[in-house]
Amino acid sequence: MISNQEPQPIKVVVIGDSSVGKTSILLTYTQDRFPIDYIPTVFENYSNVICVDNTQVQLSLWDTAGQESYERLRLLSYQSASAFVIVFSVIDMDSFNNIWTKWKPELEKADKQHLPKIIVGNKSDKQNDPQKFQIFWEKCEQENLRYIECSAFLNNKIKDIFEEVVRMTIREQILQTMMRSKRRQETIKHQKSICQLL
């Protein structure tokens, strides 16, 4: 049953190397079409109300440029982010390696390492090497990160990416709310004990 409350806002920023298919994933998801022409992204965003597990969400998706020259602009898009989708191409090992050498460090630099993240291997329609999948999956498992392999071209598992990132974000927000409540209760309890001593 869906409640009549305002949709919960969730901002997801999509990052990764240039030409890995970030914009293609977003257009396939939001407009149900694969873009034929490649147009490098500087900055785009998309917004839509969706329902995931009976929770209405105002999902705001932010597309970013992967080029080094856009780092400052990209970092601005990280403000008030709820979660990140880090995209690489399964046919480009450098883009996978850059997750660990460029993208995760950039999130740490922006103090966003604690937010939910999903690693997405795009272009699965162009690669069918099970050993590579195993390498990708194992590395993400070691890093305690969720991994989804998809094809924007075939619209395969695109919806799964965003539903999963919304679920992860909602769980994280509930956990943070519970932790704040617990800290508040402990503070009140501590203050009462001090008052009793006085």
Image (spheres, rainbow, N blue to C red):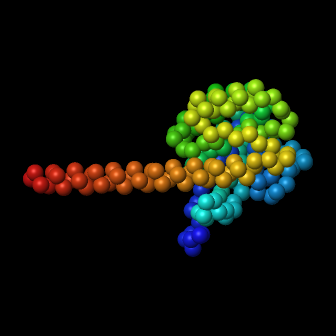
Which of these two is toward me, 179 or 36? 179
Where residue 111 appears, x then y in whole percent?
A: 52, 39
Please report the residue visible at 10 percent of the width from the left and 51 percent of the height from the top. 197
Please report the residue visible at 76 percent of the width from the left and 57 percent of the height from the top. 30
Instruction: Using the rendered view, name the quadrant where residue 132 is placed.
Output: top right
Is residue 53 visible in the rendered image? The answer is yes
Q: Is 182 placed left or right of 12 in the picture?
A: left
Extreme residue toward the bottom, this view: 4
19 vs 44: above or below: above
Is residue 72 visible in the rendered image? The answer is no
Where, quadrant-wise, is the N terminus in this rendering? bottom right
Q: Is 148 placed left or right of 152 in the picture?
A: left
Extreme residue toward the left, this view: 198
34 vs 132: above or below: below
Where residue 135 appears, x then y in whole percent?
A: 70, 27
Where residue 118 appears, x then y in whole percent?
A: 64, 42
Where residue 166 appears, x then y in whole percent?
A: 61, 53
Instruction: Using the rendered view, name the quadrant where residue 21 is placed.
Output: top right
Q: Is 113 placed left or right of 32 in the picture?
A: left
Please report the residue visible at 28 percent of the width from the left and 51 percent of the height from the top. 186
Which of these two is toward me, 22 or 123? 123
147 vs 96: above or below: below
Please report the residue visible at 85 percent of the width from the left and 39 percent of the height from the top. 125
Q: How many marks?
A: 0
